[in-house]
Amino acid sequence: MKPPPDDALDHALMMAVGRRDHDAFARLVARHYGWALGFADRMLGTRHEAEDLVQTAFLRVWQGAARWEPNAKVTTWLYRVLHNLCMDQLRARHAKASAPLAGEVVEALADEAPDSEERVSSLQRAVRVRAALDRLPVRQRAALVLCYYEERSQAEAAALLGVSEGALESLLSRGRTTLKKWLRDDLQ
Amino acid sequence: MDLSRFKECSAAYGAERHRWPEREHPIYDRFADTPEGRAILAEAGRTDRFLDTLELAPPDQRRAGHIGALARPAWRRLGKPAAALAASAAVGFVVGYLQSQGTTDAAVVAQLLLGPQSLQEIGL
């Protein structure tokens, strides 16, 4: 799910949120919840954690809306909030050395469509991809999620990660090479 | 413009042209349809297809509604019936108190206490 394209509407909603308009906030959340959750889910690897993180992100938007610069894109700002929260969470997880629950998404999908053998095989592949993404160094994972899944421009992804576009390319390249190595059997 | 740059880009951005930076599109166009270019893109495409298998469960929009409501004041989150009940109890308390003090024009006093705008806002 991609962010909605209507910047003018987002701009108007953010201005209203800055004036503490509750209805505008609810509309802003409804517009951006889907992609924000997808981003957090791919970054963190678990739906439950992603839902909590997205809630925290939107509450930060509510609290900080008055400080929002009208020349900034709302989606870029929200990506930054989400990305920073994800990085904090991943660092905290790393410190605790807790393993992500790679199968959670597959269980959720299987509940919805438990049918064919092909489907099961596809879900198993999804588990392996998710597990492989979870094992990638955090910045390589963030680069892949932003550029591949979210289809952010190189300039935007590099700015979010605080690196040059050349360094972003290197993160992407190393990430894909590592994934290819880990997933060699599946790729053949 | 050489094949090694084409290879570097496919290793970073995959096999799809739209994922490459715009400034690299000329190099994509130059090599994509050559035998070497096709082999390189086929290799990158396998990784792309594998990445594409990562599906996510659809978002629960009720959760979005819940977040949207969190910014509302608590009394508004309870909804109009609960707010009206609370307001009635408050007005009842004021009226009862004023009557015990011998004041009869309690509604006017209550309106003065709560303000006409507040009464209108909670649907009274």
Image (cartoon, coloured by chain):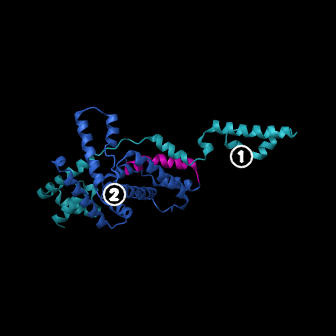
Chain colours: A blue, B cyan
SS at circle 1: helix
Q: Main secondary structure of the magenta part?
A: helix
Residue A92 x, y percent position in the rendering? 39, 57
* Magenta stretch: includes residue A69: no
Q: How far apart are marks 2 and 1 (CA)?
A: 49 Å
Q: Is residue B16 left or right of residue B80?
A: left
Q: In this view, does A96 lie to the left or right of A27?
A: left
Q: What residue sits 85% from the left and 38% below the top?
A: B100
Q: What residue sits 74% from the left and 45% below the top?
A: B116
Residue nearer the viewer, B3 or A45: A45
Q: In this view, does B14 lie above or below B86?
A: below
Look at mark 2 in the image and give the residue it sits on. A142
* Magenta stretch: includes residue A35: yes
SS at circle 2: helix
Which kind of residue does numbered mark 1 sit on? Gln
Q: What residue sits 70% from the left and 42% below the top?
A: B120
Q: What residue sits 32% from the left and 51% below the top?
A: A149
Which residue occupies the extreme front position in the image? A96
Which residue occupies the extreme top position in the image? A115
Look at mark 1 in the image and give the residue it sits on. B117
Question: Do tags 2 and 1 sit on the same chain?
Answer: no
Magenta region: which residues? A20-39
Residue A110 x, y percent position in the rendering? 31, 36
Determine the chain carrying the residue at label 2: A
